[in-house]
Image (cartoon, rainbow, N blue to C red):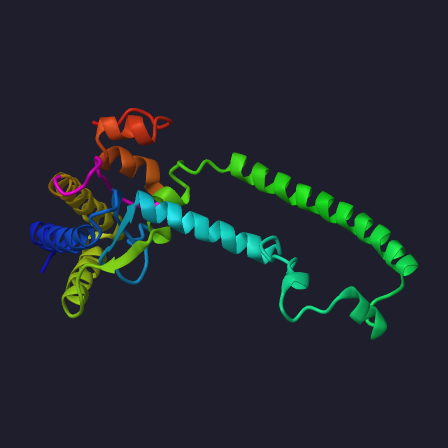
Amino acid sequence: MGVDWTALEEAIRVAALRHAAEVIAEHPEQNFYAIALHGVSTTESENISMPLLALNSVEALERDRQSESRELLVERGEDLDEDADYEDRSDAQSEEQLRGEGLIDSDNEQDDESAQSADDSEEDTEDLDQVLEAIEADLEADDNDSFYSDKWEPSDWHWSSIELCQDPAAQIWSDAMTEQATQEGWENTIKRYYHTLVAVAHSIREELNERTKVDLVAYVADDDHAEKLLELCLTPQQLDEHFPQLEQPVQ
């Protein structure tokens, strides 16, 4: 028994629409800009799985980027503030008390230490300048809006791995497609499957656009065929706006 592709398309469409609508309704203050079906490999394997659903908003993208930037600064030790207000705290001791207890050195020794501290500070400043230059170079080299950035990578999104259906339904569909691939060949089956997913992307974009504040970009994500899938899924206007570097969409 072969795969009922029409029934599969409807099952994925209904499930994707339901899950996406729930997320959008729960966050009315956010501007959702993209939705994607992903997680289906075009490389031959033991089985063909059901896709995962992913969504992202402008606000979630910015928040996640800020969080990643802060984590990077902490890892590099640039976000660790020293306690510069120690002397102003209620438990701080005066300089005379500390000197009397032998906890600080004489004035001459302090002068030597001050000179050394100044040298160390200059070295730290040079190190920080080098780090900042490296960060700036990285940012210039990485276009944050390119397709291969986190803006368009579903696995990096805030809502990244929503399962469209649970077992046993998911396993039944997976088994049916895997069996058809065994009988008719992997390439023919996976092409038909991706044709189904592209049709779902078109459908959910049209239906969800009524619930979003911007023209929703809906697509099937796969690194090996990224540009071709974008051309098949997006409207000409969306391609011009978000991916002007791509060729004209295929007919």
Residue 211 screen position, x and y as percent? 14, 43
Residue 233 screen position, x and y as percent? 22, 37
Q: Farthest residue in the right direction?
A: 108
- The majority secondary structure of the magenta stretch comes to loop
Q: Is residue 173 above or below residue 102?
A: above
Residue 250: tell me if it is visible: no
Residue 210: tell me if it is visible: yes
Viewed as shown, does residue 209 lie left or right of 161?
Answer: left
Viewed as shown, does residue 166 lie left or right of 161?
Answer: left
Residue at position x 68%, y 62% from top? 87
218 within the magenta span: yes
Q: Is residue 157 above or below residue 215?
A: below
Tell me which segment is drawn in magenta.
210-222
User: Which one is nearer the viewer's eye here, 135 or 227?
Assistant: 135
Residue 115 screen position, x and y as percent? 85, 50
Residue at position x 15%, y 70% from top? 168
